Amino acid sequence: MHDFENKLAHSLDHLEDSKVKQAMLYSLCAPAKRLRPQLLYGVLKAYGANESQGDRCAIAIEMIHTYSLIHDDLPCMDNDDLRRGQKTCHKQFDEATALLAGDALLSEAFGYVASATYQNSINNDLASEFVKAIGANGMILGQMIDLLSENVKTDLDTISKIDLLKTGCLFSLALVCGCLIANKKGDIEVWRNIGYKAGLAFQIQDDCLDVISSEEKLGKSISDEKNQKSTFVSELGFEKAQKLYLQYFDEIENDLKKCNIHSEPILKIFQMIKNRDH
């Protein structure tokens, strides 16, 4: 992705050196698949737009994703020890530093979006999409419902809502940002729905991988069972859950035909997600 890792590593160079900055970089630059930036760049390529136009939004989305992981792992949330193959931020540093690192990454993300040199109307639309995706009606709401679902029998509608809000919203954000930057506003709702389906499929995959894989291979703690959370696998069984996530990917391929794009770049990314083993 045109040297995305290097750009990410230098994205906090303007900050004063501190323990918080160290914690931010520790989690932000940990080895990861960078799926959300890949999706944003994939949309730009599909429209024939310059990928570098998406850099600031891609970095902002990765900052937000990282902040959400740092906070998810805290003792007051999922209380996990392992993330991206290394100690979670609060285990490497301490709980207060991890909390502040997450807060700071969220703040920096909005700074990156605000300073992007798009047309004013595009900047405004991007900011609005960020708030919708990660705010109290989006990712935050999903996390709250998830916490309330611990040690409680949860139905499939609730599990789907959690996954759509916690994961689907950020997938949708990446795709919608690519669409806006490419100046193809008419296709936004198609990309938004594709993102929701991708998020659901991704989380169902995670539920399946939690059953057949290991913490070492996944690079993170397998905590749903520990926290007694209902999942697609626990409710549907492994085979039906696997069939459902494959169905979502089939629907995504059909939905892509609704946009006037060169679909190969974005299809490759979805195929990679579909076939992942960790």
Image (cartoon, rainbow, N blue to C red):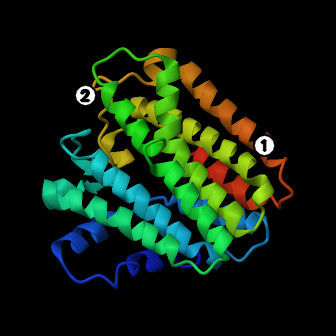
58 sits to left or right of 12? right
Which amino acid type is marked by label 1?
A: Asp
Q: Earlier in the sequence, mark 1 or mark 2?
A: 2
Looking at the rendered structure, which numbered label has been put on residue 226? 2
Q: Report x, y in % for residue 239.
A: 56, 20
User: Residue 97's image quarter?
Assistant: bottom left
Q: Identify which residue is drawn at 71% across, 61% down.
A: 179
User: Residue 148's image quarter?
Assistant: top left
Q: Identify which residue is drawn at 29% across, 23% down.
A: 228
Can you say which quadrant of the picture contains the N terminus? bottom right
Q: Identify which residue is drawn at 36% across, 14% down.
A: 153
Looking at the rendered structure, which numbered label has been put on residue 112? none
Which amino acid type is marked by label 2?
A: Lys
In this rendering, does residue 110 appear at all?
A: yes
Q: Which residue is the site of mark 1?
A: 255
Q: Report x, y in % for residue 57.
A: 55, 68
Camera-nearest residue between 241 and 41: 41
Q: Is residue 260 above or below residue 152?
A: below
Q: Report x, y in % for residue 198.
A: 61, 42
- Few, some or many C-alpha atoms within 10 Å of disc 1 (few <14, some 14-19, many ≥20)? some
In this rendering, does residue 83 appear at all?
A: no
Camera-nearest residue between 10 and 269: 10
